[in-house]
Image: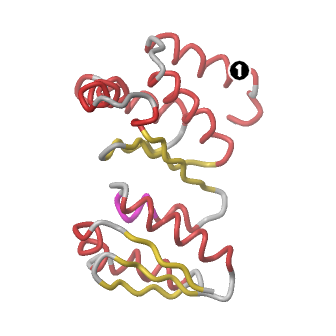
Amino acid sequence: MEEQINITAIRAEKLEGQKKFIKAITDSGVSIKINKSIVTLSAESGFGILLAKNAVLAFNRGFDSKTSSLLLDDAYDLAIINVGDYSGSKNRQEELKGRIIGTRGLIKKRLSIATGCYIKVFGKTVSVIGPYQNINLAVEAIEMLLSGAKHNSVFSAIDRRKLENIELWK
C-alpha cells in the first residue's frame, strides 16, 4: 500500500532534517520518501500507514517531531479543528485563536494540563494529540471556546466530565 501526503514546503524541508523522526517511522514498518512537498508512505499494513500519516500530518500542523512521534503508538490520536468552521472573517478567526491561546499562552497551557493532551494552534487550525480517552474532552473544550463559551465555564465542564469518568483519569 502507498499513500501520498501534501505538506508545506517549509515543513517538508524541516522534516528531512528530522532523522530520529524518520527512523521512528521506518522502525514502525513504514518507508517514507520526501520529494519537495509530497511525502510518500509505503507499507504492507494500511494501519501502519495510517499511524505514520497522522504523525506526518501532526508535524505539518506545527508539532515537533517528538510529539508527532506519539502518533506512531495506536494509543494516541490526532484531531484537527478548522477555526474557519466557526467564522468566515479572518479577523474573527484570529480572535477565536486568541481565545484558545490566551494571554501569554496560559489558556492553551491550562487546557493541555486539564485534558492531558498536546495542543497546537497553527494557521487556520487547532490540532490536538492525546490518548483516545482524553482527546474527545480536549476537542469538546476547544469547540466550546470557539462557540463563545466563557473560559471558566469550559474548565468547569472539563472538571465535571473528569469526575463523571474518574476511572479514566487514574
Quarter of the view holding residue 156: top right
- Residue 159 among magenta residues: no
Q: Position of residue 158 (x, y in %)?
A: 59, 22
Front-lying residue, 9 or 47:
9
Secondary structure under the numbered disc 1 in the rendered image: helix
Q: Does residue 86 sit above or below 126 in this rendering? A: above
Mark 1, residue position: 163
- Residue at x 61% of width, y 70% of height: 50
**Tag 1: amino acid:** Leu
Image quadrant containing the C terminus: top right
- Residue at x 61% of width, y 65% of height: 73
- Residue at x 36% of width, y 62% of height: 60
Looking at the image, residue 120 sits to the left or right of residue 81; the answer is left
Please name the predominant secondary structure of the magenta segment in the image: helix
Disc 1 residue crowd, few under 14, some 14–19, many 20+, Cα 10 Å? few
Quarter of the view holding residue 35: bottom left
Image quadrant containing the N terminus: bottom right
Q: Position of residue 152 (x, y in %)?
A: 47, 11
Q: Does residue 132 sit above or below 19 in this rendering? A: above
Front-lying residue, 123 or 154:
123
Front-lying residue, 149 or 134:
149
Q: Which residues are magenta?
A: 64-68
**Scheme of colours in the image:** secondary structure
Q: Does residue 29 sit above or below 136 in this rendering? A: below
Q: Position of residue 115 (x, y in %)?
A: 55, 34
- Residue at x 52% of width, y 22% of height: 144
Q: Does residue 89 sit above or below 21 in this rendering? A: above
Q: State how many labels appear.
A: 1
